[in-house]
Every structure is written in C-alpha cells, then in structure tokens.
Image: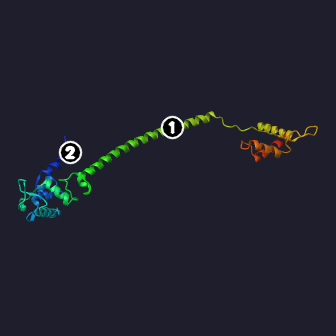
C-alpha cells in the first residue's frame, strides 16, 4: 500500500517522462489539478497561435507566452506528438514538452516558481541558492536534534524527581532530629533565685576579707572579676561585660532579699 509521500514521489518521477501539450503544461503550471486540465483546456480561448486565455486563470496567457518564447529561443526543447525532440520549427498547435525538459528549464529560469506537478514539496520550499540535498541534510540534523531534545527532557524530568525525593528525605530527617532534640527549658523562679544567690555568695567571698582582715582572693573589685572572665571566656554564651554586670547586680539583690 502506498503512503501519501511515496505516492507523491512516484507521481513526480512519472511527470519527468510525461509528454505535455503546450496548453496542458501551462495549465498545470498555473496550478490546475491534473484531473481538471482537459476541462480547462476546452474552455480556453486561443488569442494567437500557441497562446491561450482563461478569464478565471489570469496566469495562463503569460505562462503560454513564456513557454513559446523559450522554445523560439532554443532554450527549451520541444517535441511533436511522438515525443522526440526536434531542432526544426514546430507549429504552435503541435508543440509538446517532455516533463524533464520543462522541469530543468523552470528550475533554471524561474527557480522561485516551481509547480507541484514537476517538483516535490522539499524542492518547492528550498531557496534556489540551496540544493535539495543540502535541505534534506538539514532536515536530518534537525530530526536528530529533536530526538536529542526529547531525551534531554526525559533526563531532566528524572533528575527533577530524584531532587524532589532527596528534598523530601531531607525534610523528614530534619523533622526527626527536631523531635529527638529537647527544647531548652526556661528556669523557674526558684531555680533562678538559687543560681543568683550562689553567684552573689561567690562575689561576696571573692571580694570579702577574712576575720583577720586579709583579702580572700586576688580580686580587689567586681570590675577585675569581669575583666578576668572576659580574658578567659569571651565569646562564650553569657560572657559579655554588660551581661555580667546585670547578672552580678541581680545576684546581689537576690542574696540581700533572701
């Protein structure tokens, strides 16, 4: 069974070896469907030998003139009814054209006006500066690029699914870790008072004197204690001059009020 493409290809090959009466060739060049050529030919009016006119097909007359002119100039081979090219004069009423000769002449002198009965779809689309072979090669490259693009899209989708799976797994692990890590507890009033009293007691001992009047530590005042703490532990949570001053003041108040 022939596919549409293979059918069209066979029709193109067949047209190369077909013998066309001049009027029929002009009608087909004007776009007449092959099965309507005879009907149009019967309605055409011959205004001069070899030149025909159809009111609804304005291109017929100029195409007839072009073909006749090419024949008269010797650039388009002409035949009589038997299909053998001749060099002598052929009367306009007997002028016939072989498809291959007509095709070569149109391609050379009218490359931008290629009729469908002689040229396939690719040849009609291709610019005259580009060969059909080059166009087909470009089509092959284009099809290969499309195939590669489809593969790339599939790969991107697979990678996206893998990424989404990893994100979901990461979120699940994060939630699990958060559940396992206890939240920091705030100190109750009693626990805070206890800690402040301890700090206050230590401050008194460090800055106080023994019953004999001797200093109980090397620190003469609170500033010295804060300076030493900063020298050894600055950067640790809570070890900052302002924080220490506030906590020491609160410790003294707590101890005094207990």
Q: Toward the viewer: 24 or 74?
A: 74
- Nearer the observer, 118 or 230: 230
SS category of the residue bearing label 1? helix
Q: Is residue 111 left or right of residue 245?
A: left
Question: Which secondary structure lies at badge 2?
Answer: helix
Location of residue 241 in the rendering, given as x and y in whole percent from the top left corner: 77, 47
Q: Nearer the viewer, residue 120 or 57?
A: 120
Side of 170 relative to 14 (left or right)? right
Determine the image quadrant of residue 33: bottom left
Seen in the picture, residue 195 relative to 71 is either above or below; the reply is above
Mark 1 Cα within 10 Å, few/some/many (few <14, many 20+)?
A: few
**Furthest residue to the right?**
212
Q: CA distance from mark 1 to mark 2?
A: 51 Å
Q: Which mark is residue 6?
A: 2
Residue 246: percent from the left, percent from the top?
78, 46
Q: Quadrant of the C terminus?
A: top right
Please tell me in which quadrant of the rendered image residue 6 appears: top left
Residue wearing tag 1: 166
Residue at the image position 82 percent from the left and 38 percent from the top: 197
Among all residues in the image, which is located at the extreme top?
A: 180
Q: Residue at x 58, y 37 (%)?
A: 174
């Amino acid at each position: 069974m022939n596919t549409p493409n293979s059918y069209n290809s066979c029709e193109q090959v067949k047209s190369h070896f077909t013998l066309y009466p001049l009027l029929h060739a002009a009608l087909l060049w004007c776009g007449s469907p092959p099965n309507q050529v005879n009907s149009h030919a019967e309605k055409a009016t011959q205004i001069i030998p070899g030149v025909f006119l159809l009111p609804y097909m304005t291109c017929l007359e100029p195409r007839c003139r072009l073909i006749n002119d090419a024949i008269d100039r010797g650039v388009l081979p002409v035949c009589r009814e038997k299909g053998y090219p001749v060099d002598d004069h052929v009367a306009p009423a007997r002028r016939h054209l072989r498809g291959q000769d007509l095709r070569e002449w149109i391609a050379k002198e009218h490359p931008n006006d290629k009729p469908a009965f002689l040229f396939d779809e690719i040849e009609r689309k291709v610019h005259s500066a580009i060969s059909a072979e080059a166009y087909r090669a470009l089509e092959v490259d284009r099809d290969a690029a499309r195939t590669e693009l489809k593969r790339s899209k599939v790969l991107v989708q697979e990678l996206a699914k893998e990424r989404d799976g990893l994100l979901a797994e990461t979120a699940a692990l994060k939630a699990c870790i958060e559940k396992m890590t206890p939240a920091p507890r705030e100190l109750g009033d009693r626990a805070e008072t206890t800690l402040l009293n301890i700090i206050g007691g230590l401050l008194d001992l460090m800055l106080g004197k023994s019953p004999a009047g001797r200093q109980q530590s090397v620190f003469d005042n609170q500033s010295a204690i804060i300076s030493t703490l900063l020298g050894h532990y600055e950067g640790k949570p809570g070890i900052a001059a302002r924080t220490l001053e506030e906590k020491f003041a609160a410790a003294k108040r707590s101890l005094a009020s207990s």
